[in-house]
Amino acid sequence: MKLNYVVAGILFACSSLVLAADPELHMLSEHPVDGMRGGNLSGLARCGGQLWTISDRDDDRLYKLDTRATVWKAAAVLINVPSVPDDAGRTLGMKAQSFFRSLAGNGALDFEGITCDSAGNLYVLSETYSAILKVSTSGVLAWLTVSPKVLTKAREAGLLAHANALFEGLVITGIASTQIWLAAERQKRGLVKIERRITPIYYTWYCAVGCVVMTEGGLAPQPPQFPGSKLVEKDFSDIALFNNKLFLLDRNAFKICRHEMLTGKQERCWSFAADALVPSRQYNAEHGMAEALLVDAQGAWIGVDNNSTTRADGESRPIVWRFAAPAGGWDESP
């Protein structure tokens, strides 16, 4: 037993050295968000010039963000969500978890990701059901018809094994928006790609060969600035697309990491711990709370799901941070 602690300590020290080598991003601004009924900001999307967000506590609304002042205003856009498709892929534990969420006043659908296609349609991810809701520009709502083999293949690869540790983010790619990438959260974490059939049959979205692009398990260190920093489960909490690269929000490590699209291989990481973990911005929490990511040429937007808690400076609203892009751009080599 003592040997295990020694090995863990050595791994922690070595991993900390690797973490220290990741360049730090510089925070340009932070924006408390007013007007989210349930708080708990859990995703960001940009459609044209409009920013959108969601809350994992609210099943009946999306939010448009007015970003003209330092404090952003969230305006609710009410939606009438149709019945969720057959949930036979969920385990008994997952069904129990969603039942208790609803009793506690949390969103039964657990919206955890939002993205936008080139035509301006929104796609919202329900973690509870591993299902994707399409909100068209005309206001029509429909769940995507996804082959059950997607969940089967993901679970065979060790993903989606635990309730409330399922898909946590999504992004849509391809010239005709024919691919959706899904980030699986933890124990194991990974990337899954689904594709749209040009000629639809029963299931419009399916799992092609190699649809589980990458999986990864194990522990990694929290940054040294984190109070009581320790080894925790590796996790992903959102995914973004920029310049034909995928960017994953590594929540517990307080990093944004660039991944190659063909294999999902991690290419480069940047830390945002130094500015995000100054004493005034710290929460009384055991894990990171960043849950939303957007990346553009000028920098990154990171949204914080404060989980109804108050941070050290007394701020209790959801927060969005703006970080400058790396000095060499997001394409820079290690």
Image: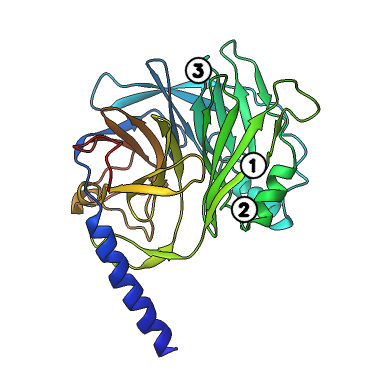
CA separation in Å, label 2 and label 3: 29 Å
Residue 22 or 70: which is nearer the viewer? 22
Few, some or many C-alpha atoms within 10 Å of disc 1 (few <14, some 14-19, many ≥20)?
many
Whichever of labels 2 and 3 marks the residue nearer the N terminus, that label is 3
Where does label 2 land, which residue?
160
Q: In this rendering, which labeled residue sits more in front, label 3 or label 1?
A: 3
CA separation in Å, label 3 and label 1: 23 Å
Whichever of labels 1 and 2 marks the residue nearer the N terminus, that label is 1
SS for tag 3? loop
Q: Are marks 1 and 2 in contact (CB under 8 Å)?
A: yes
- Residue at the location (60% across, 14% down)? 139
Q: Amino acid at mark 3?
A: Ser
Where's the N terminus, which quadrant?
bottom left
The dot on residue 118 is: 3
CA separation in Å, label 1 and label 2: 9 Å
The reply to whether residue 122 is visible in this rendering is yes
x and y, in percent, of residue 5 in the image: 38, 82
Q: Amino acid at mark 1?
A: Ser
- Residue at the location (38% across, 61% down)? 286
Whichever of labels 3 and 1 marks the residue nearer the N terminus, that label is 3
Q: Is residue 267 above or below residue 18?
A: above
Residue 226 or 61: which is nearer the viewer? 226
In this rendering, position of residue 334 left or right of residue 137? left
Where does label 1 land, which residue?
130
Residue 313 or 138: which is nearer the viewer? 138
In this rendering, position of residue 26 left or right of residue 125? left
Farthest residue toward the right?
202
Q: Quadrant of residue 93?
A: bottom right
x and y, in percent, of residue 204 in the image: 73, 27
Few, some or many C-alpha atoms within 10 Å of disc 2 (few <14, some 14-19, many ≥20)?
many
Q: Amino acid at mark 2?
A: Leu
